[in-house]
Amino acid sequence: MKITRLFTLLLLSGLTAMACSTSSNDDDAPMTPIDENAQFSTSDQMGRPAINTVFVSADNKNSFNTTLPSEQSAAFSSAFLAKLNALTADKYTTNALGQDAATFTGLLATDVLNVSLNGTTTFFDGQNVLTGRALADDVISVELLLIFGGPAGDGMQEDGTDFSALTDDNVDSNDKEFLSTFPYLASPW
Amino acid sequence: MKFKKLTYSLLSLLAVGSLIVFAADHIDAPAVSGTNVDITDYYAFQSPENNDNLVFVANTQGLLSPSATGDANFNSNTMIQFNIDNSGDNIEDLVIQVIFADGKAYAYGPVQPSLTGLTSGVEFDAVNQISVDITPYGSEANIASENGMKLFAGPRDDPFFMDFAQYNEIIAGNASGFNNPGDDTFAGTNVMSVVVEVPKSALGSSSTINTWVSSKTRIN
């Protein structure tokens, strides 16, 4: 037992020593700046903006960040539905996309960004919906509109409740111009 | 003028500091809040420079003041992984992995991962790999470009904008709606960004992908 363990340790340390040798970025050799056997485990993840922030309760925020997207719908759909009804005081019927509460929250519970590879990429631009997320997209106002906008997207709910003060945060653009060339994000303040 | 704006930004940060600051994904969960694995935002869009390319942006470590940005860095125990599902099952078929060591960022992929799920090794054998010097605060952006791929890592202005302070007031029951005009809580703040541009042809043949970004912490 002990001998086996010692052997394993020696083998591992040998592998580590080998893996520690680094190679530069040339076209022939792979770049191995860290141990070849290094393993990493998920701490945080996101797809669409603000989903964890808005729809996940405080005690589930960590677990939402480490639940695989393929398993999020089963784990979180019912909680998202309850959260939507709480946020809207049970006034939500459908949004401007015609989604009822279960359809809307079922979509959001799987927190991935849907991205088109053959057309406009935008969260919402008046025509295209959920085909990507560009830097200038006013994603918060889109989400507020889908949550609080009601069937017509004007804030009026079916029973006459007026949520129009909640459909737009009235911050429509970034505080710096984006670049037209890579890396596109503006230089830091 | 600039100083006034900065002071105001800092004051508004202090003002919302008593609440828990959650927005986009900024500081979204207790386990990662304030650490350099905290993802603030994720973007994926067609390259403004080339319709045949797609750009992935992962931002981390939100709400950096200018004075704190010079000390911000990427950790060698962190991996940023861009996950790409091109078969519609929300399981990653391809990944682009970015790790950090000795002042450089190294990107591997798009490549089919050996393992899917929470735990990942580094795909050192990926055909596509590229490295770049991490851009220091105050320097021009270092950009690596190779085999149709581009890579940047370093501080940038936070592209996210929102009146987050007022959102919190509404959620707390202290306000009935947003102000007009609103006040961008993220104005004047920076993030640590990783930007990767790849040919769409490297992402498979589907017309749509599902994508998400993970920050992963070394476990061995």
Image (cartoon, coloured by chain):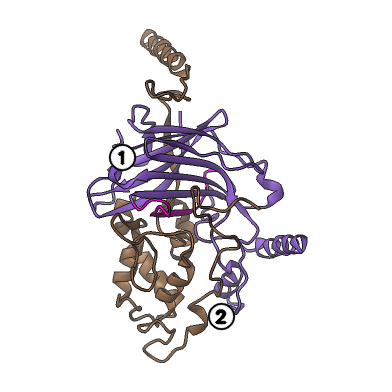
Residue A49 visible at all: yes
Same subunit under labels 2 and 1? yes
- From mark 2 to mark 1, how far is it between C-alphas? 43 Å
Residue marked by disc 1: B116
- For disc 1, the neighbor class at 10 Å (few under 14, some 14 to 19, many from 20) is some
Q: Is residue B191 magenta?
A: no
What chain is colored purple?
B
Nearer to the camera, B115 or A78: B115
What range of the chain is rendered magenta?
A: B35-51
Q: Amino acid at mark 1?
A: Thr
Q: Which mark is residue B100?
A: none
Q: Residue at x 31, y 64 (%)?
A: A107
In x, y percent, where is residue B111?
31, 36
- In the picture, measured across the screen, residue B40 lies left or right of residue B205, that is right
Q: Residue furthest top?
A: A3
Q: Are marks 2 and 1 in contact (CB under 8 Å)?
A: no
Nearer to the camera, A181 or A148: A181
Chain of the residue on which disc 2 is drawn: B
- Residue B126 location, quadrant: top left
Chain of the residue on which disc 1 is drawn: B
Question: Quick one: label 2 or label 1, which is nearer the N terminus?
Answer: 1
Residue marked by disc 2: B177
- Label 2: state its secondary structure: loop
Check the rendered structure and report the hue given to chain A.
Answer: brown
Q: Residue at x 36, y 48 (%)?
A: B53
- For disc 2, the neighbor class at 10 Å (few under 14, some 14 to 19, many from 20) is some
Q: Residue at x 47, y 34 (%)?
A: B99
